[in-house]
């Protein structure tokens, strides 16, 4: 009987994988309303998670109930010396904590995320301790988070654990709001700087995205956690280690089509256009099918 059950599960998993081929090496798709796992692929492998870490950073900071209007000054210790990643937030910039949180979540700025943890009550050691407590509370037993940005390859988790994190993060209205804004003008020492969401599906036609966070490092590949509503269903997807931004986006598009019962795009094909409209009404990104590959046209920063 046990052998028959295992065989049935294997056949079911194989059929699901065939029905939804994804480029991401690890994936989990969960329908909240029915509590059903719609698809999984290597969902229990422990791998680097890059900036998906910032969802945990945001929850821990908000749990402390800090003054969101308190001014935070970016200092030298917030500069990334591990991977020397770029940032448009200069050292010396003074911003309300609310704006720092927005920069960490919407545009995935590493200096902003580090500054949030540095200014946590009790400093960085207290922040890391609070993260460990949060992981235990959420039952994320396969997750290790050592710092707030995700730059460290030692920040590792599974798609299954990250589903728990995304579900918890979705209960914070502030996280939902900040991760689903398409763009914003933020005052940077008297100069307005235009920032965009790192997920170009946010604000795109046909999408109702309720939570979003992208991630990328060389070790983690392209990652995405997203909660969206489609065909009357609330769905959470976790995608880890896609090899390119276009592949990560195409995986998300195919998951939505799968949820909607629509035909999927072939692995080497793409929709003619995925429209993204900014507040100014300008298009943001197009995916154009050219000889079986995906060519990216960017008008607003990076994907």
Image: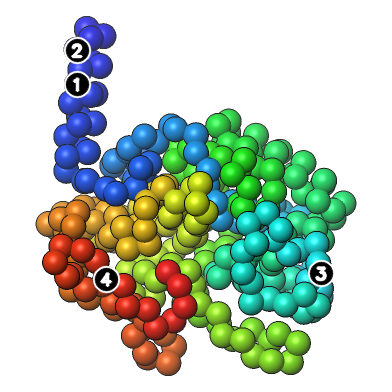
Cα gap from disc 1 to disc 4, whole angstroms: 40 Å
Q: Position of residue 70 (x, y in %)?
A: 81, 73
Cα gap from disc 3 to disc 1, whole angstroms: 56 Å
Residue at 50% from the left image edge and 57% from the top image edge: 215
Q: Are marks 2 and 1 in contact (CB under 8 Å)?
A: yes
Residue at 12% from the left image edge and 57% from the top image edge: 263
Q: Would you name the residue on which mark 2 appears?
A: 4
Nearer mark to the viewer, of 1 and 4: 4
Cα gap from disc 2 to disc 3, whole angstroms: 60 Å
The vertical placement of 137 against 253, above or below, is: above
Image mark for residue 8: 1
Mark nearer the N terminus (3 vs 4): 3
Nearer mark to the viewer, of 2 and 3: 3
Secondary structure of the residue carrying numbered label 2: helix
Residue at 44% from the left image edge and 88% from the top image edge: 279
Mark nearer the N terminus (3 vs 1): 1
User: Tag 1: Cα neighbours inside 10 Å, few (<14), some, or many (≥20)?
Assistant: few
Q: Would you name the residue on which mark 3 appears?
A: 75
């Amino acid at each position: 009987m046990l052998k028959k059950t295992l065989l049935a599960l294997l056949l079911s998993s194989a059929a699901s994988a065939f029905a939804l081929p994804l480029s991401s090496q690890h994936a989990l798709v969960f329908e909240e309303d029915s509590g059903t796992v719609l698809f999984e692929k290597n969902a229990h492998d422990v791998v680097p998670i890059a900036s998906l870490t910032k969802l945990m950073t945001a929850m821990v900071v908000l749990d402390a109930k800090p003054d969101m209007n308190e001014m935070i000054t970016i200092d030298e210790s917030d500069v990334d010396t591990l991977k020397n990643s770029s940032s448009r937030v200069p050292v010396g910039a003074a911003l309300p904590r609310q704006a720092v949180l927005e920069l960490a979540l919407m545009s995935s700025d590493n200096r902003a995320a580090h500054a949030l943890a540095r200014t946590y009550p009790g400093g960085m050691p207290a922040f890391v301790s609070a993260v460990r407590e949060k992981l235990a509370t959420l039952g994320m037993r396969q997750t290790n988070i050592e710092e707030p940005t995700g730059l460290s390859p030692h920040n590792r988790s599974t798609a299954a654990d990250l589903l728990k994190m995304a579900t918890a993060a979705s209960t914070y209205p502030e996280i939902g709001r900040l991760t689903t804004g398409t763009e914003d003008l933020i005052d940077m020492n008297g100069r307005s700087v235009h920032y965009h969401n790192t997920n170009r599906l946010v604000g795109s036609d046909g999408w109702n995205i309720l939570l979003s966070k992208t991630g990328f490092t060389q070790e983690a590949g392209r990652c995405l956690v997203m909660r969206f509503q489609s065909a009357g269903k609330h769905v959470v997807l976790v995608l880890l280690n896609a090899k390119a931004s276009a592949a990560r986006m195409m995986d998300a598009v195919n998951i939505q089509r799968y949820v909607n019962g629509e035909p999927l795009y072939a692995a080497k094909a793409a929709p003619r256009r995925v429209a993204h409209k900014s507040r100014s009404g300008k298009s943001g990104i197009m995916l154009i099918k050219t000889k079986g590959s995906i060519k990216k046209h960017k008008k607003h920063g990076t994907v």
